[in-house]
Image (cartoon, coloured by chain):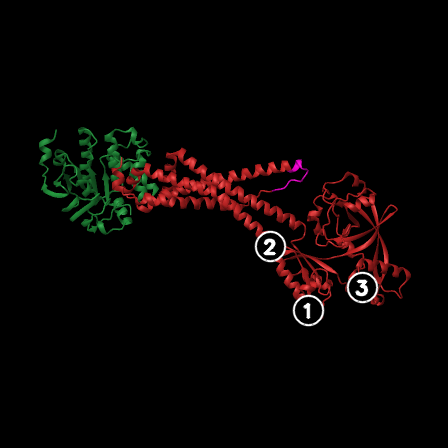
Chain colours: A red, B green
Amino acid sequence: MKTPDLLELAARNLRESILRNSLTTLGIGVGVASLVAMLSLGIGLQQLATRRLERTGLFDTVIVSRRDFGGFGGRARGAAASDNNRVLDEDARREIATLPGVLEAVPDLRMMTQLRLDDKSHRAMVAALPLSARDREAFENIQGSFFSSGNAAEVIVQKHFAEELLGLATSTDETSNSSGPSPALQPLLGKELVMSYAARVAAAGSASKAETAAQTKTQATANSPTPNPDAMLSAFSVVPQIKTLRIVGIISDDPDTLRGMGRARAFIPLDFAQGLQIMLASDLRDGSGLGDRAYTQLSVRVRNSRDIPGVEDAVHKMGFGAFSVIDASRNLQRFFAVLDLFLGIFGSLALAVASLGIINTLVMAILERRREIGILKALGASDSDVKKLFFAEAGAMGIVGGVVGVSLGWMIGKIINAGTNIYMHRQNMPSETFWSVPWWLVLGALGFSLVVSLISGLYPAARAAKLDPVKALRYE
Amino acid sequence: MTESSPTESGAIRTVDACRHHTMGTSLIRAVDGISFSAQGGEFIALLGSSGSGKSSLLNLIAGLDRPTSGTVRVDGRNLAELSSEELARYRRNSVGIVFQAFNLVPGMTVAENVELPLRLAETERSERAGRVREALDRVGLSQRLTHRPGELSGGEQQRVALARALVNSPRILLADEPTGNLDSHTGLEIMERIRDCNQRLGMTVLLVTHERALAERYAQRLLFLADGKLVTDQPNPPRVENREGK
C-alpha cells in the first residue's frame, strides 16, 4: 500500500474512536511536556550560569605573563629553561592576538595615582579597560554610561571609591551591596577628576629631584621589594603628569575579577591609557627603552571557552606563562550534564507511562478491529501492510502528542519563569531567564515522542499482522 | 500489477489437498485429501452440509489459508509455496471473494469500500474513481457512492461486496454462501450478477452453498463434499434453468 493511502486509512481509523485516541495522544503530550519542561529547566539554568560566568570574563580569558614573573603560576607551568624569558612586548601581543580563537589581546595597564576631586586628593589604583569590557557583567547595572570612545578622557569609578570621593559613609558590608543605582552618587557624574600619575618620557640627562620623587611612586605601584638601581641608568625618565578626566559612570563590581590583588578603584579607556605612557612595573625590571614597551600581563579574550586549551598551549610554546580557570568551567559543564541527565530521566518517566497508554490503545484497537483486519487481509493486504497501518497510527499519535507536549512544556516553562520573576522582583532582584527551549530540544522531543510511539506500536502491530484472516472473519 | 497477467485464465487444480487442525486433543480434518480441477471460466458449486469442509476448501483456494499437505494450484502456481507477501498479492490480484456476512467496513462509504482493493494494489489515484464507478455500475449501485453500508439493504450490501470483489478484475470469483443472509428474491438477484461475471467476464466462479436448487440453477458442475472429502463431482448441464425459470 502506498504511503498516502496508508496515512489516510490510519487517520480514518484514528477518527473512528476519536475520544480514546485523543486521550492517548494527550497522555503522550503530557509525557513530552514533562520531558521538555524538565530539560528546558536544566538547559535554562546551565545557560544562565554560563552566561553569568562568561560575563565575569573568567571563562573566556587567558592571562599571559612572562615566565619569570610569578604572578599567576607562570613559573609553575613554564619550562625550567630560563633562557627562554621572552619579553612580553607589543610584537608578542600582536602575535598572540592572531592566534586562532583569540578575540583580542589587551595589555594589562594599571597604576597607582592621586585622584583629586575639588580640593581633596585620594590615592587609587587606576586600570585601563578595552571597549569590549562593556559587555561584562560588572557594567550591566552601571550608573551613568560606559566610555564614549577608546580615546576619551573619561573615567568610571567604583562605587566605594565614589562614596569616598563624595565623603559619604562607606557601606562596608559587601554582601548588602545591591547593584541598583544610588541617587546619592548621582551628583558625581559629569564632574572632573584630576589624575596625577607617573609617566615615562625619553631620558634627558641626569635624574632630577622630581624624577626621583616619581620614581619612588612607581616603586610603590610595582610593589617591588627593592628598587632596581639599573632603572636609574635606563634610557628614559619618569615624570609626574596630570590629566583631567570626566566621571561618566559608577559601577559596583570590579570588572577584573581575575585579579584580587591591587583591585582598581577607577577605570579609564585602554587607548587613552596607552597614550599616557604610563610607567609600568615591567619598565623597571626589563630596563627596556621607549621604543619597545614591555607589558606585565596581557588579558587574552577567546571566542569560546573551548578555545582556551589551544591558546594556552600556543602561548606556552611562545615562551610565556598562561593562566585560566578553564578547569572550573569543565567541572561546571560536567555538573550540568549530570543534572540534565537526571532531569531527562524524570521527564521520561511520564513518557514511559504514556507509551503504555499507546500499547493499551492499539491492543484494544486490534480486538475491536479484528474483523476489519481480516477483511483487509482477505482483500489482499499483506502482513506488512497491516503492520505499517498500526505503525502509522502509533506514529500519528506520537507526532500529534509531541506537538501538543512541546507546546504544553513551553507554556509551563513560560508560566514558571514569569512566576519566578514576579518573586524575584518582590525580592528586589533583576529578572532572569531560567527556562530555555532551544530548537534542538523541540526537534529532539518530537523525534523522541515519535520513536517512543513507534516502539510502543511494535507489539500491537506485530500482533495485528499475525492475525489469521480466516479466524478474524469468523469472529463475531 | 493491478491487472491480472494475460497468462492467467483462472484454472484451479488441487491434488490431495488437506487442511487439518487440532482442537484440544482431537484432530479435525476440515479438508481431507480433495483433488479436483476447474478450467478457467467454469462455474462450479461446492455443496455439502455445514462442517463438510466446503468453506475450508474455498479458503485454501482463496489463499487465506494454507493446506497442511497436498497442493493447491491456481494457474499453475502452487499456493502452498508462496510467501505470505506473494499470497497477499495473489489475493489482491487473482481472486475476488464474496462472503455470506458481506464483510464491508462499516465506517467507510460504498465508494471507499470498493476502492479498498485498489488502494492495496497501489492503483493510481486518478484511475480509481473510474474503476469504482465501473464496478458499481456492473452491480447497479452507482447512485449510492456516498452511503454507508448501514444505510443499505442486505441485497445492496452484497452487491457492494460483489463490486469490491470485481474491482481489481480478478480471474476467479469465490463466493461463500453469498445468498445466505438474503431473502430468496434478493438472493436470486445476486446470483444473476455472479452469473453475469462468469458469462460476460469469463471469470471462474466457485460458489459455496448448501442450497442445492440454487447450485443446480447456476453452476455448470456440482461438487458434493462430506467430512472434508469430495463425494461426488457431477456435471450440471444448463437445462436446469429452462425448467425452473419463471
Image quarter of the C terminus of chain A: top left
Q: What amino acid is at disc 2? A: Arg
For the residue carrying disc 3, how many other residues have a C-alpha within 10 Å: few (<14), some (14-19), or many (20+)? many
> Is tag 3's residue or tag 2's residue first in the polypeptide sequence?
3
For the magenta stretch, what is the residue range?
Answer: A424-433
Q: Is residue B105 left or right of residue A64?
A: left
**How far apart in space, not on screen, are marks 3 and 2 (Cα)?**
38 Å
Q: Position of residue A434 (x, y in %)?
A: 60, 42
Q: Is residue B80 left or right of residue A187?
A: left
Can you identify the residue that label 1 sits on?
A80
Residue A424 lies in quadrant = top right
Q: Are discs 2 and 1 less than 8 Å apart at CB?
A: no
Was residue A203 drawn as part of the magenta stretch in this picture?
no
Question: Please, which chain is the residue tagged with disc 3 on?
Answer: A
**How far apart in space, not on screen, are marks 2 and 1 (Cα)?**
28 Å
Was residue A425 drawn as part of the magenta stretch in this picture?
yes
> Is tag 1's residue or tag 3's residue first in the polypeptide sequence?
1
Q: Position of residue B236 (x, y in %)?
A: 10, 39
Question: Please, which chain is the residue tagged with disc 1 on?
Answer: A
Q: Position of residue A368 (x, y in %)?
A: 33, 36
Front position in the image: A375 or A462: A462
Residue shown at the point (34%, 41%) measured from the top left: B126
Residue shown at the point (77%, 38%) measured from the top left: A183
For the residue carrying disc 2, how many other residues have a C-alpha within 10 Å: few (<14), some (14-19), or many (20+)? some
What numbered label is drawn on residue A330? 2
